[in-house]
Image (tube, rainbow, N blue to C red):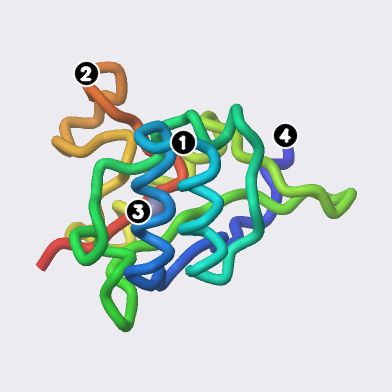
Amino acid sequence: MLLGLPIVTCGYRSNAEQNALYAQGRQSLAVVNQLRKAAGLSPIGKVEAGRVVTYKRSGQSNHNHLPSLALDVAHLQEDGSVKWDNAALLLFSRLMRYADKRITWGADWDRDGITSDEQFRDWPHFELHG
Ligand SMILES: [Zn+2]
C-alpha cells in the first residue's frame, strides 16, 4: 500500500490567521470570512465555517511561533491529489516520535500511544515541546 509523500500543509501561522481559525464554529459565517480576509485567507463556506478546528486563540498555538514549533501533515498521492488519511498519519506519527521524543502528535496529546482517549483529535498536527 502506498501512503503517499508526507507534505507539510501548515507551519508558521500568523496571529491574524489563528484568530480566523479560532472563530470557526464560534462566530457567524460573515465574521469568520471577515477575519479570514483580514488575515489574507480565501473565504470558506458555511459548513466549514461552522466546524471548530482549533482550541487555541491567537498567540497560544505552537503554529504562532517563528520559527514554527508545530506543523500539519498530509500525504501527496501519485495522481497529485492531497489526502488526509488517519491511518497514514498514524504511521507517520511513529516515524516522528522515533525521530524526536519531544514531538507530540495532535491525535495523542497525552502521548500514551492511544488515540481513542482524546477529547479533541487533530490528526495532521505535530508539535514540539521543550
Ligand atoms: Zn496544527
**Count of marks, rendered view:** 4
First in sequence, mark 4 or 1: give its number.
4
Q: Residue lying at the far front in this picture: please name it.
A: 30
Identify the residue under disc 3. 126
Using the numbered discs, state the Cα–Cα distance from disc 2 to disc 1 in whole angstroms: 31 Å
Mark 2 is on which residue type?
Asp
Using the numbered discs, state the Cα–Cα distance from disc 1 to disc 3 in whole angstroms: 29 Å
Q: Residue lying at the far top in this picture: please name it.
A: 116
Q: Residue lying at the far right in this picture: please name it.
A: 79
Numbered disc in front, either 4 or 2: 2
Quarter holding the N terminus is top right
First in sequence, mark 3 or 4: give its number.
4
Q: Residues within 10 Å of mark 2 (few under 14, many from 20)?
A: few
Identify the residue under disc 1. 28
Q: Is residue 32 left or right of residue 82?
A: left
Q: Is residue 128 visible?
A: yes
Which disc, if any, is residue 1? 4
Q: Position of residue 85 (x, y in %)?
A: 59, 34
Mark 3 falls on what kind of element?
strand
Ligand 1 within 8 A of label 4's CB? no
* Residue 64, quarter of the rendered image: bottom left
Using the numbered discs, state the Cα–Cα distance from disc 4 to disc 1 in whole angstroms: 42 Å
Mark 2 falls on what kind of element?
loop
Mark 3 is on which residue type?
Phe
Mark 4 is on which residue type?
Met
